[in-house]
Structures are given as structure tokens and as C-alpha cells.
Amino acid sequence: MNGPGTPKEAHYTGNSMRGAFVPGEILFLAETALETLQIGDVVAIFERTPYYVHRIVEKDASGAVTMGDNNDRPDSLRLTPDSRLKLVVRARSLNGTVRPVPGGDAGMEMFRRQQRRRKMRRIAGCLLRPFKPLKFLRLPANTETRFRDGTVQWSFGRIPVAAGAPDGKRMYLHWSKRLFFRIPKQASGSASGQSAQEKQAEGGK
């Protein structure tokens, strides 16, 4: 069931599906019905405000259970045939590239991979905790690129470090980037770089 007023696309923010998506990416949503979905599919769920995007990890005749790829437990809300949801079919990256979103067996393989990485990040965090006072030595990622859809990317030279969504939420592109780089505490009022779309437009002149 899709329900009235559900969008056809959405900006991804947050951490629960990092790895599958990067904050600021645009997700394209398709009409669907719960009975046609597979374990491993990614769905946008509109049963709560704000709505969220998670993966189906269990499914039977009565409904389905979802969970974020980086979460440590399934969602408490169980999906039923009457739930308001849509299937996430494609994602547009910050550079404008559109890619399909894996579902089914490929989606579950991605889920298991992210769960392994989550455990590794937890171990790494414990090992690196004594070095937290040295975080001021990180390199500044001050090169800011703003895109026309409102997303932002911070880089150190040619190295992409972090991304920001139009609502102000920011996320490092990989956990290791946090160890070596730091981003400005507040986004600057004007972009210090050109958007990918603007660069492409100028290149075609």
C-alpha cells in the first residue's frame, strides 16, 4: 500500500543505511505492494514522522521486519500489507551519477557486509579512544563544493571527506576519514567551489 501524499523521491540523511547511501543522495521511490517485496529490498516507510529508509530482513505471509544496515537491532514497527511504503529503486550520488539499489540476495549480502563493518568500527573505536586528545592534529577539509540540489561536499584537495544534506545533517563518507580529517563546524555562507553541474555546464560552452 502506497497511500496518498507519499513522495517519488527523497534526500537520504542519517547513519542507519550508510554504506548503501551517502547523506545528501537522492533516492528514487517506486509504487509497490508488500507481497511483491523480497528479503533484502530497501523500502521507504511512511508509517511514522519523519519517515525512514531501511532494509527488509525478515518476511512471512503476515508481514515483514526491517532494519538499518548499521543498526544493532531490528525495527520495532512490523510492516503489514496495509503499511504505507515504497520501494527504493535508484539513488543519485552527489556527482549526479544514478545507480540501481540492490535488493533480494544482493541486498542481503550488502546488509551482512555492513553489519561486519559496524562491529569492526566498534572495535576500532575502543582501540583508538586513548588517542582522542590528538584529534586536533587532523587535516582540515576546507574545500567546499555546493550542488544545485542543496547538498554539500567537503574535500581535502582532491580527496572527498564528508557530505552534507540540505537539512544541515553532515556525515563523513567513511569512518576512517574521521581519523585523518576534520570538517568546518559550521558550513560557510558561500561555496568555495563550483558544483559538478556548473563545471559540466561550463565545460560544454
Image (spheres, rainbow, N blue to C red):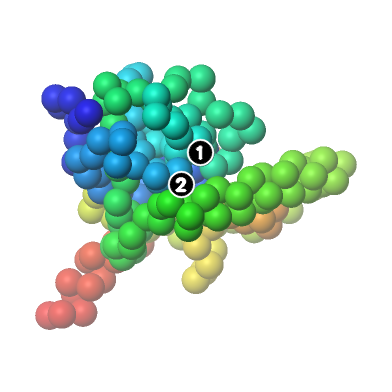
What residue occupies the far front of the structure in this picture? 61
Query: How far from the left and from the top, in percent, is residue 80?
Result: 35, 23
Q: Which mark is residue 7?
A: none
Residue 170 or residue 156, whichever sits in front: 170
Label 2: few (<14), some or many (≥20) within 10 Å?
many
Q: Is residue 168 visible?
A: no
State the count of labels. 2
Q: Which residue shows up at 25% across the image and 44% down it?
A: 29
**107 above or below 42?**
below
Q: Secondary structure at mark 1?
A: strand
Instruction: Give residue 52's quadrant in the image.
Output: top left
Q: Are marks 2 and 1 in contact (CB under 8 Å)?
A: yes
Query: How far from the left and from the top, in percent, is residue 36?
Result: 29, 41
Instruction: Give residue 71's quadrant in the image.
Output: top right
Amino acid marked by disc 2: Gly
Q: Quadrant of the N terminus?
A: top left
Q: Secondary structure at mark 2?
A: loop
Amino acid marked by disc 1: Val
Disc with the residue nearer the chain's start (2 vs 1): 2
**99 above or below 91?**
below
Q: Which mark is residue 40?
A: 2
Q: Which residue shows up at 74% across the image and 49% down it?
A: 120
What is the C-alpha distance between the residues marked 2 and 1? 6 Å
Residue 99 or residue 138, whichever sits in front: 99
Label 1: few (<14), some or many (≥20) within 10 Å?
many
Q: Is residue 81 visible?
A: yes
Report whether 30 appears left or right of 140.
Answer: left
Q: Which residue shows up at 20% across the image and 40% down it?
A: 31
Query: How far from the left and from the top, in percent, is residue 201?
Result: 17, 72
What residue is pinned by disc 1? Answer: 57
Residue 77 or residue 122, whichever sits in front: 77
